[in-house]
Amino acid sequence: MELARSINKARAAVRSLPKPVGFVPTMGALHAGHRSLVERARVECASVIASIFVNPLQFGPNDDFLRYPRSFASDSEQLEALGVQLLFAPPAEHLYPPGFATTVDVGAIASRYEGALRPGHFRGVATVVLKLLDALEPDVLYMGQKDAQQTAVIRRMLVDLNVPCTLVVAPTVREPDGLALSSRNVYLDEAQRRAAPSLYRALRSVASAIDAGATDRERVLAEARRELEPPLREAYLDVVDAVTFEPLDPLHAPAVVIGSGWLGTTRIIDNVTVEKVLCPV
Ligand code: AMP
C-alpha cells in the first residue's frame, strides 16, 4: 500500500490505478464498520483507496476534535491487510492552506438534526469530501448508512455540483446487542454502554409501527421514547424523508427513522430505514 501525504502525489498515484477506483474516506480509529466499506469496495471496484483525515472543519468549538481517537499505525496496517492500494493522509495545513476561505454549503438538509446540533458540521463535511474527491478522482465513493444525514448531504452535493462520482451507501455494522459501531463508543463507561443499545430499540419500535401501518407521528414517537434507557437522554428522535430529511407527518414508508442520544458528554447517533412494502400480504 502506498502512503501519500500530498495531493499531487495522491492524484498521480490514483491515476495509475486500474479503474473503477473505489474510495473510502475515514477519520481513522477504524472498526468493523469502516472495514465493511473497504471490503465492499474491494468486491465492486478494480482498485480501492482510502483516506484518514480528522477534519478540523467539521468539528465545532465544543466538539471532541482534540480528544478524537487517533490510531494511525494500526489503521494503516488494517487498510493494507484489506488490500487498499493507496492511503491518503494529508496534514491539515495541506488541505487548508493559509487564508483558506471557500466552503460548500448544502442548504436545508444540512440545517436540521445533526446540522442544528453541530452548526457548521455539514459545511465542513461537504467541503472536505469535495476536496478529497477533487484530489483523488475516484469513480465510486463508499459511505455508511450509519451517518444517514451525511449521506443525504453528500448525495445532494454530488448532484448539485455535477461531481462525476457514484455514491454507494453500505449498511450499518452493529455490535451483537444492536449498538451501531462508532469510533466514539470508546468514550462510553459501563453504565452508558449498557444503555446505548436502547436507542436502536427505540428506532426499531418506530420502524415496526410504520411497517404495521401506524401514521400518528406523536403517538408512535411517544411509544418509542419509552424504550430509551437512562442514563441515555434523547437528543432527537424523528421520522424523515431519506432524501430531504424533512420530518414526515403523517408517517408513511419509505422513511428513515433517525435518533440520537446523550450519554454523559458523548452523543451517539443511529437510524433505521423503512422500505415501502409493494405487495402487502
Ligand atoms: P468516520 O471515520 O466516522 O468519518 O466514518 C467513515 C465512514 O465509515 C463513514 O462513511 C461512516 O458512515 C462509516 N461508518 C461509520 N460507522 C459505521 C458503521 N457502524 N457501519 C457502517 N459504516 C460506518
Image (cartoon, rainbow, N blue to C red):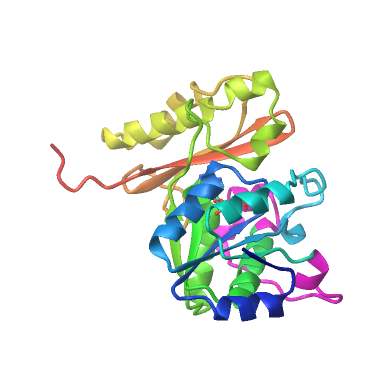
Say which quadrant the C terminus sits in.
top left
Q: Position of residue 17 (x, y in %)?
A: 52, 76
Instruction: From this view, report whether residue 21 is shown above or below residue 219.
Output: below
Front-lying residue, 148 or 79: 79
When asked about the image quadrant of residue 272, the answer is top left
Residue at the location (74% across, 66% down)?
A: 90
Query: What span is in magenta?
Result: 92-121
Position of residue 127 in the picture relative to residue 219 (left or right): right
Q: Give the camera-side residue of 228 and 247.
A: 228
Query: On the rendered structure, is 1 left or right of 223?
Result: right
Q: Position of residue 157 (x, y in %)?
A: 53, 70
Q: Does residue 258 appear in the picture of this structure? A: no
Image x and y of residue 260, in percent: 58, 37
Task: Indicate the quadrant containing the N terminus: top left, top right, bottom left or bottom right.
Answer: bottom right
Q: In the rendered view, tell whether residue 163 sits above or below residue 83.
A: below
Q: Is residue 229 above or below residue 168?
A: above
Residue at (69% x, 62% y) in the render: 124
Left-right relation of 25 to 203? right
Q: How many marks?
A: 0
> What percent of the width, then of the height, locates residue 279?
14, 45
**In the image, residue 112 lies in the stretch drawn in magenta:** yes
